[in-house]
Image (cartoon, grey):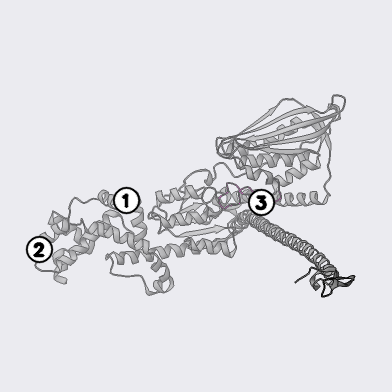
Amino acid sequence: MHLPPGNYDFKVQGTNSQGVWSDKIATLHIHVLPPWWRTWWAYVCYALLLILCVWVYVRFTMNRAKLKAQLNFEQLEAKRVKELDTVKTQLYTNITHEFRTPLTIILGMAKQIQDKPNENFNTGMDMIIRNGQNLLKLVNEMLDLSKLETGKMLLQLVNGDMINFLRYIVEAFHSLAESQQKQLHFLSEIDSLYVAYDPEKIRQVISNLLSNALKFTPAKGNIYISVNEQPVHAQTNKTNLVIKVKDTGIGIPKDHLPHIFDRFYQSDNSHTRKAEGTGIGLALTKELIKLMEGEITVKSPPPGSNKGTEFIVSLPLTLVGNDETDIVMPVLKIEHAPANSPAENKTIITNDRDSAKPLILLVEDNADVVAYTASCLPDYRLAVGKDGKEGFEIAKEIIPDLIVTDVMMPFVDGFELCKMLRNDEHTSHIPVIMLTAKAGIESRLEGLSTGADVYLEKPFNKEELLIRVIKLLELRKNLRQYYLKKAGLADVAPSPAFYAANGEIVLKDNKEDEFVKRVREAVEEHFSEADFTVEQLCKLVFMSHSQLHRKLDALIGCAPNKFIRMIRLNKAKELLKDPSNSIGSVAIDCGYNDPGYFARIFKQEHGVTPQEWRMNK
């Protein structure tokens, strides 16, 4: 029998044999102890253990939360550092590009002036001054931003007519807008407003906003500058001037709007962005407006709506009397490339019309770079495309002997242009030189991997560019002999030195082997047909007459008519080796119904008549 723990009395009363019970009852006190796990000290241990578990759990949870918070912090910090590195890298890339492009022109034109001062002085000095001012403007913006960050920039207030000053600034941009086929409209609800303001800060703000509007507004577009006054209180001499700059450009994506005033931020960081820049202008603009205790906001409908972007500047100003004016108008001159710069036209063949000279296509969106590069290549015919998309269209149309392209261009960048050229049968054979400010090894490798033959950094050396052009054109001549040999139309192959130095290029040029082979086979299938024409050949290879002519001329140095004739005469030589074939039958088999005409053509090509050629063999 198992008794639960506790105190018990065990009582005993005795009886005799007659059944008589005794008067006394014996009592035994029994204390049943609990098992050890139910003792008081066990419960104390349980309580202590529970407290310990709770404490451990709390500590664990707190440590895990701390660790998680630390990990999150480290991840956020790592993300922030990565973003900062990305911003820095982009900043360095943009600034490098912004510096290298004008430096290319300044150093190149300075060297040309030094070599030929009488020929290049006026044009060269204009380009040097214009690009020097662009560099100075960039440096000044960076210095101003640094001063604003450290609080060292102060307002230099003068009294004057703000409306007249704004009209004066806008007027300075009219010639630039007209050269880009854009219209500037100054709209003011008030004729004059005499206030105290800092003219240089106002000039920087308005100039940056107008420059941005012009950059991102297409030709035939409009930029509107509207001004109105919002009095603060009737009893005070304070007023609020609202300036709106609205364009009909491409607009800004909604997710980019909160960041456009960040330092070094660009809504388009790709190689195909439509305008150059470092991302300093709008950041500087906002800081200057903040210094003047004003505000700037931006509104932009979704891109593609053709409603452009609107910047709204609100400036608190102190009214003054018109007799207190002490403003002196600064001299404002907005420098830009001449309207007749080569980059303004779609295609220009320059220098002369000597068709024997190689034709080079320049693909570059900077007019001054185009002008300078063109001046480096005076002995060639030149065509110009202002961006990658247009450059590709021109390349397919004119089939140039060589292409010189930039990397960072609107619509299609240099890397994508190279891929398009290499993947299109019309242009796959054309050598490509990349001139770019993106000088990093990754960009160089990307350029070479997309099919560029040469990758030159800006500022480039004129002599190196000329040597590269000459060598690439020489290589193209050797390739002509190679393809003629492939087509069975040449007995002399390129020199062994060509294979030793450029064998890899020939081996990887399989697309051209296939093209020449395809054209040759198309002719061979119809060479016995006297009425087989170039137009029929064009249809068989899916090219226009002009495209096929330029392609064959670039590859093997002959026109389609001559190519067909060479194929026929080459076949004729094979048939003439068999004495059983008469001259007349050979002529008919090779597409010549008149044996006499065949004999004249054969002699014209090989210097002997078919009969003499057979006898000599």
Could you tell whether 476 is left or right of 160 in the image? left
Question: Circle 3 is placed at which residue position?
Answer: 278
Image location (x, y in percent) of residue 143: 76, 52
Looking at the rendered image, the quarter that the C terminus falls into is bottom left
Q: Nearer the viewer, residue 80 or 352?
A: 80
Could you tell whether 161 is left or right of 481 in the image? right
Magenta portion: prevailing SS class: loop
Q: CA distance from mark 3 to mark 2?
A: 77 Å
Numbered disc total: 3
Image location (x, y in percent) of residue 327: 81, 35
The answer to which quarter of the image holds residue 563 is bottom left
The answer to which quarter of the image holds residue 527 is bottom left
Q: Nearer the viewer, residue 39 or 305?
A: 39
**Tag of residue 267:** none
Residue furthest right as drawn: 24
Could you tell whether 264 is left or right of 511 in the image? right
Question: Circle 1 is placed at which residue position?
Answer: 542
Q: Element at badge 1?
A: loop
Amino acid on which the number 1 mark rests in the picture = Phe
Q: What residue span does the magenta drawing correspond to?
A: 262-278
**Within the magenta stretch, is there residue 300?**
no
Residue 452 visible in rendering:
yes
Question: Circle 2 is placed at which residue position?
Answer: 582
Amino acid on which the number 2 mark rests in the picture = Ser
Packing grade of label 1 (10 A; few <14, some 14-19, many >=20) is: few
Looking at the rendered image, the quarter that the N terminus falls into is bottom right
